[in-house]
Image (cartoon, coloured by chain):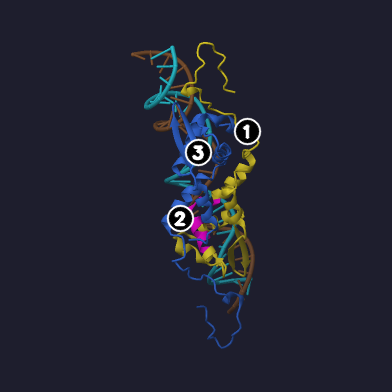
Chain colours: A yellow, B blue, C cyan, D brown
DNA sequence: ATTAGACATCGACGATTATCGATATCTTGA
DNA sequence: TCAAGATATCGATAATCGTCGATGTCTAAT
């Protein structure tokens, strides 16, 4: 550890003797792979336009939201909206259902709640 | 709305008559600037190594965590760790306190909880 | 079959990001 | 004053990302 105090000349504790660099107990800590998966879901939320899409979908939760609802309020072109929707679907946050010509999107029940709980539950 | 049924020949509702592109009520929806701020905080959580840093800091909540604790378990070099810590501090998630030569980090109380609540509270 | 329209995919471009070596800053003990 | 060490900052590089025009695909109605 940090027990370098076998020195006979100085036994008093300096500020620098305050234990630093405590070995982190590896058990309690988020491992690389789980961190990767969690980060991927937060990454889906790390873009303002995607958050606004979620906001619109959540506000319309009674009726589903279709792609055509989105380009105008967001000020984005259709391919860009489609791109963001794909990211949210891949992250398991949105559900896509194609009916006829249109694609309707809705929140995956519990997805945001589950992500939310990872922030308040004691890490791992 | 979509009442184009004044046509005498066909009065039945096609699939395509299902109302699509409902005008989004602009009041209920996350505005650009708030979306930007929220996204910035999620972006801080969108990297696996930053999540692992938070996990380590949270696990050590009794004693504070110093920078020197981190490079080894993460497999990162010190400048990289410093970079991630800065991002977490700037996002208001970590608190930095310099004592002597060392910099100690701790969770900002309530920061993760507040972010968490934005995910479960009805959007806006 | 053909057309029109909604949506997805592709390819490109500029902007941002994660990483790290090199270096600067700052604090402490000699 | 000096040297050592902990941390922050700088500069570069490769990779990823957001955006959009062009194009492809699929569906429904003619």
For label 1, the SS is loop
Question: In this picture, is D4 found above or below A109?
Answer: above
Q: Residues within 10 Å of mark 1 (few under 14, many from 20)?
A: few
Q: Which mark is residue B35?
A: 2
Subunit under mark 1: A
Q: Position of residue B113 (x, y in %)?
A: 52, 50
Q: Decide whether the magenta segment is chiefly helix, strand or loop.
A: helix
- Chain bearing mark 2: B
Magenta segment range?
A44-57
Residue A81 placement, left or right of A33: left
Instruction: Find numbered disc 3 in the image and state the secondary structure of the residue it sits on.
Output: strand
Which quarter of the rendered picture does the C terminus of chain A lie within?
A: top right
**Residue placed most toward the observer, A22 or B22:** A22
Rendered position, A105 above or below B40? below
Percent coordinates x, y for residue B43 in the rendering: 50, 47
Q: Could you tell which of marks 3 and 2 lies nearer the N-terminus?
A: 2
Image location of residue A82, percent across then percent down = 54, 58
Front disc: 1 or 2: 1
The answer for how far apart the CA atoms under marks 1 and 2 are is 37 Å
Cα gap from disc 3 to disc 1, whole angstroms: 17 Å
Reading the image, the residue beneath label 1 is: A25
Farthest bottom residue? Answer: B8
């Amino acid at each position: 550890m940090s027990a370098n105090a076998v020195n006979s000349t100085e036994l008093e504790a300096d500020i620098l003797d305050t234990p630093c660099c405590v070995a982190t107990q590896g058990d309690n800590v988020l491992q690389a792979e789980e961190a990767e998966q969690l980060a991927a879901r937060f990454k889906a939320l790390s873009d303002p336009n995607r958050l606004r899409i979620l906001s619109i979908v959540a506000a319309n939760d009674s009726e589903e939201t279709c792609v055509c609802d989105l380009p105008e309020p967001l000020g984005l072109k259709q391919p860009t909206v489609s791109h963001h929707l794909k990211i949210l679907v891949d992250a398991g946050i949105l559900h896509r259902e194609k009916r006829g010509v249109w694609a309707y999107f809705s929140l995956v029940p519990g997805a945001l709640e589950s992500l939310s709980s990872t922030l308040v539950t004691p890490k791992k």
